[in-house]
Amino acid sequence: MGRYIVKRLISMLITLFFIITITFVLMHTIPGGPFTGEKKLPPEIEAALNEKYHLNEPVFVQYTSYLKNILKGDLGPSYQIKGETVNHIIAQTFPASAQLGVIAIAIILLIGVPLGVIAALKQGTWVDSGVMFIAILGVTIPSFVIATLMIYVFAVKVNILPAARWGTWKHMIMPSIALASYSFAFIARLTRSSMLEVVSQDYIRTARAKGLGEGIVIFKHALKNALIPIVTYIGPLAAGLLTGSFVIEKIFAVPGLGRSFVESITNRDYTLIMGVTIFYAVFLVGMILIVDLLYGLIDPRIKYDD
């Protein structure tokens, strides 16, 4: 496993290098610049800003300088927020997105997986139909619609939850449910189909024929192997949820990373766009590596060889 992890870390570094390069090239290919807006700056001020941030240098020089700074952990200054660095902006906004993402992931796993297991065990009954009906609703109704409905009901009509902002546990309830709605429904359907496939295998019938209790058969033998596709899905999903959802954060005015990313695109804040993209990419490749390592723990038949 040690050699496998080393090889994967090397491939992750290569992947991140290409992501950084492609993002940098795209930012410098887009027409206009970070100081190009509806209100055009005087030419001398724009020239001074370009000189201050070294944007008047050749693109290759800017690229090599940016790579050197990244190796030092420096994502550069924000072009639009005075006196702020990209590192500081991410450090300020990531905790709120991470809190929201952790709660959403907990809802997805603690509700979606059990409902999928119950639906599989009660296949063809009203319980199965009810769970699948809820899952279909969650998949088909967009999260922003669910968020709007919850605000109308729980904040406007009933007035038991705050409509927006961030700070207390009450502020976390509605955005986390809205963020988890689609994935929770998808996980429930995925768990059901995976469980149905596993419980039809010969080793499950053998375990039952040996007289093992139904609980042991389901939770020790069937569910463990049914988790493979769930873990595959939840890995990249966790990276996306933890680094912010700009739709949900915008609706509920959550001061998270997703909201900052959208604002950086609107403001043409190139360094912030690249910094958040790199930050998400690191999370994504890291979660994919964790998923690959979890495969061996879930199913001992999976070996990490060349």
Image: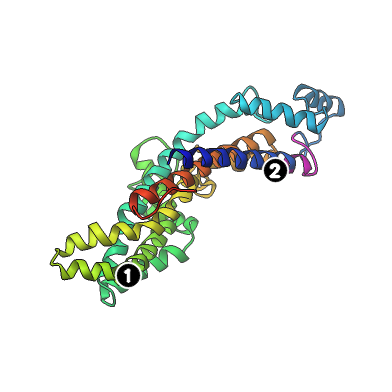
Q: Quadrant of residue 182?
A: bottom left
Judging by the rendered image, the residue that carries numbered circle 2 is: 22
**Residue 203 locus on image (x, y percent):** 26, 67
Mark 1, residue position: 196
Seen from this angle, which residue lies furthest front? 306
Residue at figure coordinates x 84%, y 29% from the top left: 42
Q: Residue drawn at (29%, 63%), measured in percent from left and top?
A: 117
Q: Amino acid at mark 2?
A: Ile
- Contact check, label 2 and label 1, Cβ < 8 Å: no
Using the image as rendered, state which of residue 237 and residue 103 is in the foreground: 237
Above or below 64: residue 243: below
43 falls in the magenta region: no
Residue at x-position 53% and y-position 45%? 250
Question: Which quadrant: the N terminus?
Answer: top left
Magenta residues, start to end: 26-34
Q: Which mark is residue 15?
A: none
Q: Foreground: 239 or 286? A: 286
Residue 260 visible in the displayed image: no
Which of marks 1 and 2 precedes in the sequence?
A: 2
Which residue is at the front of the view, 41 or 105?
A: 105
Q: Amino acid at mark 1?
A: Leu
